[in-house]
Image (tube, rainbow, N blue to C red):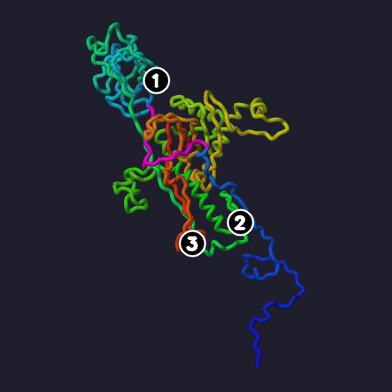
Amino acid sequence: MAITAGGNLNSVAASVQQTLATNYIDFTSTTTAGWAQQYLPDLMEKEAEVFGQRTISGFLAQVGAEEAMTADQVVWSEQSRLHLSYIGTVDADGDVNGTFTVTTDIDGNALTTNHGIRVNDIVLIAQAGVVVKALCVETPNSAVVSVEPYATTALSTLSDGAATLLVIGSEYGKGQSYSDVTGTFNSERRTALTPQFKSFTNKPIIMKDYYEISGSDASQVGWVEISGEEGQNGYLWYLKAEGDTRARFTDYLEMAMLESELSDDLSAIGFADKQIRGTADSGASGSGTEGLFAAIESRGNVTSGITGVNAATDLAEFDAILAEFDKQGAIEENMMFVNRATSLAMDDMLASMNSYGAGGTSYGVFNNSEDMALNLGFSGFRRGSYDFYKSDMRYLNDKATRGGINDRAGSAAIRGVIIPAGVSSVYDQALGKNLKRPFLHVRYRASQTDDRRMKSWVTGSVGATTSALDAMQIHMLTERCLITQGANNFMLMK
């Protein structure tokens, strides 16, 4: 009988007296034995967090609120201006009388015959360096308004061309009624004014995402200990992957509300053969939603100031922002969310107003002393009659979000946003009464049977078995939109 030894019967060689620099595992080596070596490396099990807090959500939670909705769209109305002011052209026919042709209201909305100027109104007509006070004597159902000045030669100081007209009151003679059409100053009956109704609308979008892992991988343990923003920890790698997917989706909830816009009529988005199914074939009217940036660019204010050129220039540009707020709602308290460069430019601007001597720094306002680190940052300040609370906006700084986009965008980069704090009074059609709501708030779809603010559910055969799929799928869904009320009080910094 013969006994034949296997080819690798003594595959482990006998001990030898030998010390080598290669007696550590090299995971990337193709020439050493790798895991076949007898010495283990010092494994650092904890995954290094090299990007700090990676999520950017939280902005809307600071400045707005969330409310449920049960409809496919949100409709709200906003007040118009109380006083009557118009932009147009003046034609000074002579010293006795002239005409003012209405083109737009003071905010640039086109007007023709439906302006609010009436017979016997006292008006101010302004051009560069000149203001004339006159009485309206005729509005013959057109955009052309006839006026006669109080000062005999006043109209001669005006030049034919662009001008602004403001109604400041009215004047009547003794016993004169609205229906009195006799006399030079009453060529037509004075009519009553009715406030113009204007409504705004926005629609929610449905956002979805999911994570999937096979049943085998779900039960596989790794050597790296993971942790994440959602609180997940342990040695199961899918916990990290699922947590990252959920954190990314949570950020999407905010990023979409900031950046989204409604598609225009020529966009192919929304046709039945495109990615968004179920919308009308008439085009993109059912696609998209109006985000914060789009709402401000459409109905609010945009500034290119405060870029850090120098403190004096930045201060002048900041005062121009205050002047614009004076023209709008003049909300006293405002939140500023800006990128790093704009934040530092504001710090330098404010610090320049608190210095003395040749570059010396005042300690009092900064709350500094010689024995502590100098603090040159500002989180809040007051200018004029406005209070501002400044905060860095991570979304505008992070390279993987708007920070990287801004590096490419140049002059189109978004550097920050100024948002009024507090609430506005709006009419809620569903409840039939006025309600106090934040200027900025999120509406999400919800009812007694289904809440779509942030839905999450698990399917598959891992854990609670719901199907024959040998995997675990974690689904996430939301249906929401952002309501930007009083956008004229907002300022976008670009």
| Disc assigned to residue 234 | 2
Q: Which residue is mark 1?
A: 128
For the residues marked 1 and 2, what is the alpha-carbon distance in whole angstroms? 72 Å
Badge nearest the viewer, 1 or 3 = 3
Establish if 312 lies above or below 245. Answer: above
Of 186 and 226, nearer the camera is 226
Of 329 and 86, nearer the camera is 329
Please check the rendered image and state whether residue 204 is part of the magenta-colored stretch, yes or no. Answer: no
Of 301 and 273, nearer the camera is 273
* Amino acid marked by disc 3: Ser
Q: Quadrant of the N terminus?
A: bottom right
Establish if 81 lies above or below 300. Answer: above
Q: Are marks 1 and 2 in contact (CB under 8 Å)?
A: no
Q: Are marks 3 and 2 in contact (CB under 8 Å)?
A: no
The answer to whether one can see residue 291 in this image is no
- Horizontal and vertical percent for residue 95? 30, 12
Establish if 21 lies above or below 360. Answer: below
| Disc assigned to residue 461 | 3
Q: Residues within 10 Å of mark 1 (few under 14, many from 20)?
A: few
- Horizontal and vertical percent for residue 227? 60, 53
Residue that appears at 50% across and 36% down: 63
Residue 225 vs residue 174: left or right?
right
Residue 268 vs residue 57: left or right?
left
Residue 128 picture quarter: top left
* Amino acid marked by disc 2: Gly
Residue that appears at 34% across and 9% down: 151
Q: Residues within 10 Å of mark 2 (few under 14, many from 20)?
A: some
* Amino acid marked by disc 1: Ala
Please state the extent of the stretch shown in magenta in the rendering: 62-79
